[in-house]
Amino acid sequence: MATRKKTTLGVVHVTATSPKTNLTMAALKAMHVARGWSDTGYNEVIFRDGRAEISGRGANGIGAHVAGFNSISYGISLEGGVDRNNKADFSTITAAQKKTLERRMKEISKQYPGIKWCGHRDLSPDKNGNGIIEPYEWLKECPTFDVIPYAVSIGVKPADIKGTWKVAAPVPGAEIATV
């Protein structure tokens, strides 16, 4: 697989799997291969138990997680993100996952000093051209929480994307803000 030449963007995702689904990296790879990709789209996945695992793409591989940005971005995904009815639901993300996400975002930021963080939905097109990615413009709700203010709250660089946040940026140590 191809290797990224630079890494300037970190993109947080959810796998959009229900609480009844217990993923393995092999199962996630099979889901993504069935969609026509060569491997798991993300570089890394954080499972419900808080375990982080690098995908077959490797940490430096070009992902298939956000069209137009794969060549410069590191994709990290949380297992879950939807309820049993397939509706976006941040409550499916465990405390262990939240703790690991914070740790991994900080570690990845040290590994790639120029990286800035956002959520998958923050890279949706600005349909009305006002310079703000608003909820009605999101192609999907992934990752079901506001990553940009969360990045600020944990002390990593946020991507320079203007959005409409339903909550104020949380203070350091606070729970991840949900929408």
Image: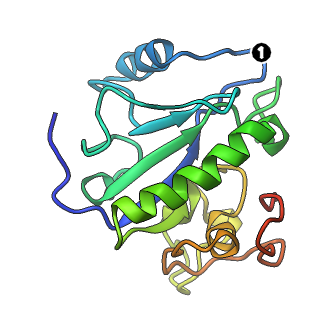
Residue occupying the far bottom of the picture: 130
Quadrant housing residue 17: top right
Count the marks. 1
* One can see residue 99 in this view: yes
Is the image coloured rainbow, by chain, by secondary structure, or in one colour? Answer: rainbow
Give coordinates of residue 13: x percent, y percent. Answer: 56, 46
Residue at figure coordinates x 59%, y 33% from the top left: 15
Give coordinates of residue 68: x percent, y percent. Answer: 31, 57
Residue at figure coordinates x 62%, y 69% from the top left: 151
Q: Which residue is mark 1?
A: 20
Residue at figure coordinates x 70%, y 26% from the top left: 49
Relative to 117, is 177 on the left or the right? right
Instruction: Report the quarter where the C terminus lies.
Output: bottom right
Vertical placement of residue 31 versus 112, above or below: above
Quadrant housing residue 95: top right
* One can see residue 142 in this view: no
Relative to 97, is 28 on the left or the right? left
Instruction: Report the quarter where the N terminus lies.
Output: top left
Give coordinates of residue 148: x percent, y percent. Answer: 62, 70
Residue sitting nearer the eye, 131 or 62? 62
Vertical placement of residue 177 versus 126, above or below: above
Give coordinates of residue 9: x percent, y percent. Answer: 39, 64
Residue sitting nearer the eye, 166 or 157? 157
Secondary element type, mark 1: loop
Residue at figure coordinates x 24%, y 54% from the top left: 71
Dot 1 surroundings within 10 Å: few (below 14), some, or many (20 or more)? few
Task: Inspect the image, locate mark 1, and give the three-letter code of the amino acid beneath it.
Answer: Lys
